[in-house]
Amino acid sequence: MENDMSRRVVAEFFGTFWLVFGGCGAAVLAAGFPGFGIGFLGVAFAFGLTVLTMAYAVGHISGGHFNSAVTIGLWSAGRCPARYVIPYIIAQVIAAIIAAAILWIIASSQPGWVPGRFAANGYGDLSPGKYGLGGCFLMEVVMTLAVLVGPDRRRGDRRAAGSLDVRAGSHRRNCRGGGKASDSLISSHPLAERS
């Protein structure tokens, strides 16, 4: 059991590190170049691809949460046992801090770098669209619910889109600590062949 928990925690660490380093790294290091930066769309793709690559790389080990809010949300929905919550969150926070520190070192090596502008985003003046706190909070709630409450094969809902099944496919099998191989990411897609 200890070895299983260690594998899960390392998988969450690695996945969270990659998410922060790849997603935030794209925003900090590549988005802001006028004329040839990757822009908002590139940053969105970077975040999506980091989650996707880690879901396939280590999602089958830990369930692929890579975010403390996802871990807490899945636990509160009864989809993740309590014994995984604290170790996952600790691994996620440490991984995020290490990835952010590495990004800080890289970004600060640029001439003319200003520390106060390092990955600043949020609401009000820190929002590209100058959105207020209430609007930003509502968007976070709605988008989080869309991910956590999406179609679920366990409820017999076969309308799930591939992207929603990618976020939950490995979780269904692994967060509960078992399952059969047919519950993996690819075969959990509603259009995948069933044996």
Image (cartoon, helix red, strand yellow):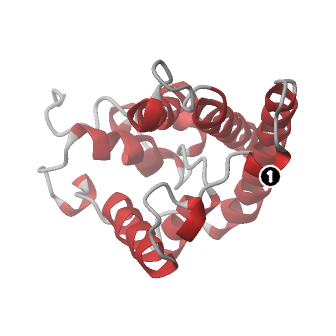
Pick the quarter of the image with the C terminus: top left
- 113 or 167: nearer the viewer: 113
SS under mark 1: helix
Residue 119: x and y in percent read: 68, 46
- 149 or 156: nearer the viewer: 149
- 135 or 7: nearer the viewer: 135
Residue 109: x and y in percent read: 87, 24
Q: Is residue 167 above or below residue 129?
A: above
Q: Residue at x 13, y 50 (%)?
A: 158
Q: Amino acid at mark 1?
A: Gly
Q: Where, by quadrant of the figure, is residue 106 drawn?
A: top right
Q: Is residue 93 above or below residue 98?
A: below
Residue 55: x and y in percent read: 49, 34
Residue 100 appearing in the image: yes
Residue 155: x and y in percent read: 22, 63
Judged left or right of residue 43, residue 25 is right
Direction bottom: furthest residue: 134
Q: Residue at x 82, y 34 (%)?
A: 113
- 35 or 152: nearer the viewer: 35
Q: Which residue is mark 1?
A: 116
Residue 122 appearing in the image: no
Q: Residue at x 41, y 75 (%)?
A: 135
Q: Residue at x 49, y 65 (%)?
A: 74
Q: Is residue 84 above or below residue 5?
A: below
